[in-house]
Amino acid sequence: MRGVTSGTLGKIRGFVDPTAQGKLAKWARLLPIIAAYEPKLKDFSDTQIRKEGLSLRHRARSGEPILHLIPEAFALVREAGRRTLGMRHYDVQLLGGIAAAHRSIIEMQTGEGKTLTATAPLFLYALAGRGAQLATVNDYLAKRDAEWMEPIYRAVGMSVGIIQAQQQPSDRAKAYAADITYGTANEFGFDFLRDRLLLRRIREGQNDLIGQMLFNQRGASGDKPVQRDPFFALVDEADSILIDEARTPLIISAIPGEAEKIQVATYTWCAEHALDFVEKEDYEWDDEKKSAELTRKGRNKVRAIEKPPILDTVGMFDLYTYTERAIKVQREFHLDRQYVIRDGEIVIVDEFTGRLSEGRKWRDGIHQAIEAKEGIEVTVATGQAARITIQDFFLRYENIAGMTGTAAASRRELKKIYQCNFIPVPTNKPPRRIKLPTRVFGDSGEKYRAIVSEIEELHAEGRPVLIGTRSIDKSLTIAELLDEKNIEYQILNAYHVEEEAEIVARAGQIGRVTVSTNMAGRGTDIRLGDGVEDLGGLHVICTEMHESARIDRQLIGRCGRQGDPGSYRQYLALDDELLLAGFGPKKSERLKKIGERGGRNFNPYESLFKKAQRKVERKHFRQRKALMYFEKQRKKMQREMGQDPYLDSTN
């Protein structure tokens, strides 16, 4: 282990943040102490390794501070990883684990091994006997990572549980009772609400429909909550869950009322006539709020259009509101961008990951308006029996930490809300990622032709290429152009989520061309095939800038992992959506007209895209702050009235 400390510190000194640098330098002093246990542990039998884990558990439960056990606990997990999986934690992975143990959001670049890093802090906190939970973004990753790392935990005497959607209550109770539990943030939150509702029904002795429904769902264990008190949570993809999804409400709906048919008929009627309304004549569009407001002429049109008798009981003001909502949906929500249709249902496509968001629905009638627009069965917008936001749920934990590949831009927000340090962890090997000059075009058509030309050139060399797009329809556009060139490719989007891991894992093979939406393989490493390193490694093409720089970094991070060679290039056009989002319709229209003139060098406009991105990021931050303020006020009022802030007092 000679030179470990000085080598690691040398990498740390490259960071600008002096606070993070100081903390990492302090924690790096533990690395030689951890290494000193290694020779002894290598000589232990499997039984002795397990006994050592049980001994640490006894010490933690006898009152010894958990953080004092880091050297021994981390050394034990490293040895367990080596002998069970052939995966020995790198020093930087242990360093990331130490930072997580100290309530930090750690930033580790893509491919640096966050899955293995998580095992050390999870084991450490599980020693206290109060449970340690890892929250990730989907069921597949939760199950894969838990089963993959389980041999390590078993070797040191720990049990592992997995929470999955559609899981039986008795199985959930067992999973939460395990020392370490893997699951999704959404499932953890919904179980909290179900437990809360169940306890209230039992406490109040009510035998109503909701109470009976919850009891039936839980079966034989229906009289007991499944979760333990929140102790330690390690959040994977922390920027996505704790920032992007922070204000997403998790809602358990109440029983539908008698107005179901009228409500469905209203959504359907408005969807049928939404396209009859003309902007600036019948309604005014607020681009900042993304909302429509009917003019006097528009309201008169609502009155004049023939209506079915079932709408006679609907107030005219309500009809105006439903119509404005239908107009908004026609303008802002598009099939294969914000949602897909699967098995006759609208399924939301997460804007940050490109994955399907199972079980989620848009609020305020938007989901029902989209169902009506697409001509599928309209689900009733019910009341709320219980609700909590992702942010509120994780703020309940005594200890919280996170892992991500891209959180630097959100470090202040994470510190303010979650009281977590932001710690960028150095890479195990120096990065060899090359940035090629950005290319800016007058319009998207010209941009896509240039993209396909570059793909064709690299494909002829045998070099693998990963193309990242913002939406499903744009990935299909690229796919059609590749078909014209007879270039074989794999496509990765919300329609192919089951094959995601396999598609991504093979994206680094010779001659491979992979077209993906925002998900860009998160959770699965892209390993280079034989001979690819000599060709320059994986090349990533970014077809647009996203509204968040973090999403761009996630895509770029797919190349150049673990010291591999790689390169990337950004392609932009003056009709890209980002300019509209950042500057509004007037300026974006002017830029489009400039682009339509053609025949000129548009590269000097690159700075405009970065400016637009910063404006959108600031706008989203203001929205999150406002929502957080209103949520706090709502909870405060309910507590003052003696009500549970997570439950609806009428149910």
Image (cartoon, helix red, strand yellow):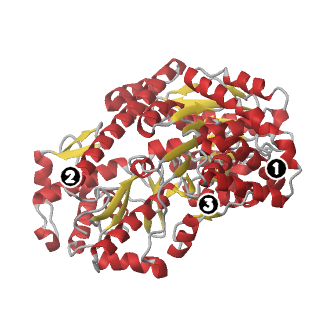
At 15% from the left edge and 65% from the top edge, which residue is drawn? 306
Q: Amino acid at mark 1?
A: Arg
Query: In what element is the residue under mark 1?
Result: helix
Q: Which residue is mark 1?
A: 82
Cα separation, mark 3 vs mark 1, equals 21 Å
Q: Quadrant of the C terminus?
A: bottom left
* Residue at numbered disc 2: 640
> Which quadrant: the N terminus?
top right
Which of pointers 3 and 1 lies earlier in the amino acid sequence? 1
Distance from label 2 to label 1 (Cα)?
Answer: 54 Å
Q: In the rendering, at what x and y percent does residue 226 appear?
A: 48, 68
Three-letter code for the amino acid on which mark 3 is drawn: Asp
Residue situated furthest front in the rendering: 62
**Residue on which the image places disc 3:** 179
Q: Position of residue 332 (x, y in %)?
A: 36, 47
Residue 523 at least partly seen: no
